[in-house]
């Protein structure tokens, strides 16, 4: 057990997905602790048949199964705040998995409370990011609870060992993505793929592995226009239709999938410092990110806009590193949210063959001022004023011996 607490657990809640790691974890936990076990299945819109996972948990020996629909909460209270910040990890990754974990962990704690459990367990590996995100959340919200991390306790050293164990214990696996399971994580924002054949970063993804967005060759020949409507920094509708938070993500997901939007193949730096090759498919996230920035571009004060850009990498690192419930994330979020009051309006995007282009934007709070912007004559800006500004701002180049660059 990872916590100081050496007491034997009486009732464990395990976050269960039905994949290899959590299936083995369930059987192993029952075998090892011989206590009551509740399987908690989080619905973040992964689109898989959750009934299948629930039946599997029961079959593997869970005493109780709880499926919790978190889709609206995920969109409204986790994805949208992050999109208000335009968060992007290492310049490319939209953090679809990173933002799902604190919610899964928080809901996991709620289930533990409801069923009166004294321990929580998860199936994330001891090398990865997800264990940190889960356990940072547990620690921030319920530091008293015992946390069991099977990957850090059991004798298995690899996914191959898990496959052996699964074979011996009659654990059925969905091998539709190949004869060995990739590590896949899906929700309303994205699908991420890791492991197996992807571990060679020089090799393209095997044919048929990526299932979320269409291959470019299969996307429509004609472009499509998408309008996203924002209020106070949050998307509230698509193409003239008002939608719930999860509804927006779903609508954008469908459009994005059709046009092959948001596929990304990268090598990223994990929290512990090792590199990992990941493939992501984030159709809704990609459209939302561009749309939000487009409306912001009209309404934000220029200094606020630039400060927001500077805060973004810091905010992003906090989310990536599992610090969603830490005070510094809340502090930055408060500043970011303050900037969003007027981020109301529409972004008009064109999607075609895997590309997203912003082709228009409008807002009732637009600060865009044609009188100032125009190349035609105007009566708000006297171009002779620029001379004074330039004279003052070039003093350092003209005074004394100047600051002509010296070659190092
Ligand atoms: N590397 C990504 C991240 O840290 C994706 C992790 C996905 N998790 C998984 N179990 N496949 O956010």
Image (cartoon, rainbow, N blue to C red):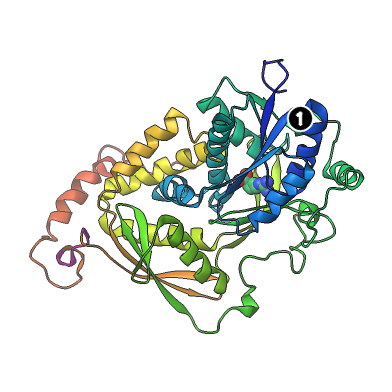
Q: Nearer the viewer, residue 393 or 252?
A: 252
Taking the spot 53% from the left edge, 34% from the top edge, the residue there is: 110
Taking the spot 39% from the left edge, 36% from the top edge, the residue there is: 332
Q: Quadrant of residue 191?
A: bottom right
Specify the principal SS of the magenta part: loop
* Residue 218 horizontal/vertical position (percent): 63, 79
Taking the spot 72% from the left edge, 36% from the top edge, the residue there is: 127
Q: Is residue 369 magenta?
A: yes
Q: Which residue is mark 1?
A: 152
* Residue 33 horizontal/vertical position (percent): 78, 26
Q: Quadrant of residue 337?
A: top left
375 w.r.t. 217: above or below: above
Total of numbered circles in the picture? 1
Q: Is residue 274 magenta?
A: no
Residue 91 in view here: yes
* Residue 202 horizontal/vertical position (percent): 76, 58
Q: Nearer the viewer, residue 116 or 84?
A: 116
Q: Which residues are magenta?
A: 365-371
């Amino acid at each position: 057990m990872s916590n100081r607490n050496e007491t034997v657990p009486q009732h464990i809640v395990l976050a269960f997905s039905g994949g290899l790691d959590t299936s083995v974890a369930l059987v192993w936990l029952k075998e090892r602790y011989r206590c009551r076990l509740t399987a908690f299945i989080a619905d973040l819109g992964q689109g898989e048949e959750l009934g299948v996972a629930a039946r599997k948990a029961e079959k593997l020996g869970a005493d109780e199964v709880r499926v919790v629909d978190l889709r609206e909460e995920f969109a409204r209270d986790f994805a949208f705040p992050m999109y208000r910040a335009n968060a992007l990890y290492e310049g490319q990754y939209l953090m679809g998995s990173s933002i799902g974990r604190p919610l899964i962990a928080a809901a996991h704690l709620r289930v533990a409370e409801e069923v009166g459990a004294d321990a929580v367990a998860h199936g994330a590996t001891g090398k990865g990011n997800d264990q940190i995100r889960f356990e940072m959340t547990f620690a921030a919200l319920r530091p008293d609870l015992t946390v069991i991390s099977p990957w850090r306790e059991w004798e298995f050293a690899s996914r191959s060992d898990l496959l052996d164990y699964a074979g011996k214990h009659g654990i059925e696996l969905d091998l539709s993505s190949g004869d060995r399971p990739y590590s896949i994580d899906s929700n309303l924002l994205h699908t991420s793929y890791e492991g197996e054949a992807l571990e060679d970063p020089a090799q393209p993804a095997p044919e048929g592995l990526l299932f979320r967005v269409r291959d470019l060759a299969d996307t429509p020949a004609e472009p499509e226009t998408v309008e996203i409507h924002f209020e106070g920094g949050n998307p509230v509708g698509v193409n003239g239709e008002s939608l719930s938070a999860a509804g927006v993500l779903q609508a954008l997901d469908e459009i994005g999938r059709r046009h092959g939007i948001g596929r990304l193949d990268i090598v990223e730096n994990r929290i512990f410092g090792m590199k990992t090759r990941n493939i992501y498919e984030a159709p809704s996230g990609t459209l939302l990110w561009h749309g939000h920035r487009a409306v912001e571009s009209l309404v934000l004060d220029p200094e606020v806009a630039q400060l927001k850009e500077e805060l973004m990498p810091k905010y992003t690192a906090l989310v990536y590193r599992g610090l969603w419930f830490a005070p510094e994330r809340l502090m930055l979020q408060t500043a970011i949210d303050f900037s969003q009051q007027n981020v109301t309006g529409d972004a008009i995007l064109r999607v075609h063959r895997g590309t997203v282009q912003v082709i228009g934007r409008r807002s009732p709070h637009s600060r865009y001022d044609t009188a100032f912007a125009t190349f035609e004559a105007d009566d708000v800006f006297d171009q002779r004023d620029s001379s004074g500004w330039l004279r003052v701002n070039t003093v350092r180049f003209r005074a004394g011996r100047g600051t002509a660059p010296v070659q190092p």
